[in-house]
Image (cartoon, coloured by chain):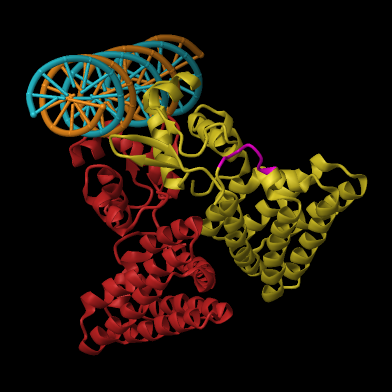
Chain colours: A red, B yellow, C orange, D cyan
DNA sequence: GTTGGTATAATTGTATACAATCATACGAGT
DNA sequence: ACTCGTATGATTGTATACAATTATACCAAC
């Protein structure tokens, strides 16, 4: 988990190792396994065509993430992810993304800076053409670059976690043309602050960027984007 | 992992479930297993008197945390925790602890407020007497209260993780009388800002509190506090 | 001596078997 | 009819067995 790159992350998802974990994780985040539902090892195993062993390993990981709760000798229960959880994570991410931008200001490499600029040029182009698919990919990549550029294994790891967590929600909101063009504009602000070596401005811009994404999400109805994934809201 | 309280956390550590995980984790954080060392399932299992199954489950958790890296069909290698990692985590914690203080301002219950005040009174008393043991316990508890009071499962979970991560280092720095009295003073500032309902001040105070703890740690030689736990520093 | 390949050993990945624990149902006693 | 206790079944916890993969050592060919 230490210094994986995007490629590994993706292949990992579809290769054998971690397949069970990701599948169960997706099923929780997608609401296939509902809140408070008891996950039985054999049942899940049969469902995925594997024995209990890999399922148990996945359970342990999911528990650490807080997605399920394992009661010893009893069972694993889906904790789920509530609307408030997503909101909270956005706020936490806002703070840490700001920190990443701050650190990136002093640590970004030339190659990373170039890719970031290129990313924004391309985003602006695709935004003008309305290519939503490409915009989403570029948006993801922009944040990846930022995480890499901050030069902190810990922060990178954490932000990736958050990013993945809210990816499903974010994908929906990003498909809205209006927001995607605003988003690109904010990316440019972050990039230019970093390029100018203005850490305060970079942090502030990154902070606002995530808050804006959150606001937009709420405005457009987080609940709808999340429909069916859970029953009770807190 | 969802809504555990302190008691569960502690018993969990010494009960059977999670014993293997915590033991390996401690051995990594304490430097018993050194950086880049390959952890073999049978060896670790024999060491702890268990079979491979629980060891593997623990490995998966540790990988998720970033403490080890598992290369499929090859082995598990200790990622370790560098001086920079600890520094980074302090900075990340600073931001999130600020957020916790902000949220606590509007969400703290009367009982929690009372316990927080009591905690500070006791801390001030023990600080004046030089009771380092009690101060450390109260200090831990203060942060626990803050995490609970912020009323966010996600943030609480995250901060607990960070807190545990740096606990070993923090314990050493806190044994210094000078810092412990400063620390209590800062706790009071946070508490009073929360009590006054001033979220901005609470966030700022909590931010500074962690940064100060970090500065103090660096000033007193993080490297020494960390001696022997690792070989190469980045 | 170096290189390449094969055989062997070591290690991980997965499945299964057995033990321990917990939930449920049934029945005896009151 | 109700309660308690025991027995049965289901489920998790752990150990072990087997399969797949990787590392190592040895030997032959050049």
Q: Residue furthest bottom?
A: A128
Is residue B40 shown left or right of residue A46?
Answer: right
Residue at 78% x, 67% y: name it.
Answer: B192
Image x and y of residue C16, in percent? 21, 20
Is residue C11 shown left or right of residue B219?
Answer: left
Is residue C3 shown left or right of residue A119?
Answer: left
> Can residue B9 be seen from the camera position used here?
yes
| For residue B117, above or below residue B22 | below
Image x and y of residue B18, in percent? 49, 33
Image x and y of residue A17, in percent? 27, 42
The span picked out in magenta is: B225-231
Q: Quadrant of residue A74?
A: top left
Q: Quadrant of residue B136?
A: top right
Residue at 86% x, 42% y: name it.
Answer: B131
Examine the structure image and report whether residue A68 is included in the region drawn in magenta.
no
Closer to the camera in the image, B54 or B79: B79
Residue at 22% x, 46% y: name it.
Answer: A15
Q: Main secondary structure of the magenta part?
A: loop
Closer to the camera in the image, B154 or A110: A110
Image x and y of residue A171, in percent? 30, 71
> Can residue A226 be seen from the camera position used here?
no
| For residue A46, above or below residue A27 | above
């Amino acid at each position: 988990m230490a210094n994986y790159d995007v490629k590994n992350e993706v292949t990992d998802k579809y290769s054998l190792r971690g397949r069970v974990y990701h599948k169960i994780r997706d099923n929780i985040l997608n609401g296939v396994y509902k809140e408070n539902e008891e996950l039985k090892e054999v049942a899940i195993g049969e469902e995925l065509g594997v024995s209990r062993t890999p399922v148990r390993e996945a359970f342990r990981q999911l528990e650490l993430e807080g997605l399920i709760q394992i009661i010893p000798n009893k069972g694993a229960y889906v904790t789920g992810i509530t609307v408030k959880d997503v909101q909270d994570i956005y706020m936490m991410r806002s703070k840490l993304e700001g920190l990443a931008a701050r650190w990136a200001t002093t640590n970004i490499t030339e190659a990373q800076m170039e890719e970031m600029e290129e990313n924004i040029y391309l985003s602006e182009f695709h935004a003008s053409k309305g290519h939503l698919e490409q915009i989403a990919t570029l948006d993801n990549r922009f944040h990846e670059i930022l995480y890499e550029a901050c030069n902190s294994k810990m922060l990178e790891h954490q932000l990736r976690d958050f990013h993945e967590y809210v990816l499903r929600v974010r994908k929906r909101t990003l498909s809205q043309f209006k927001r995607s063009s605003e988003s690109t504009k904010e990316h440019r602000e972050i990039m230019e602050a970093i390029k100018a070596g203005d850490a305060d401005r970079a942090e502030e811009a990154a902070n606002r960027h995530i808050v804006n994404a959150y606001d937009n999400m709420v405005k457009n109805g987080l609940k709808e984007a999340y429909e069916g994934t859970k029953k009770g809201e807190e």
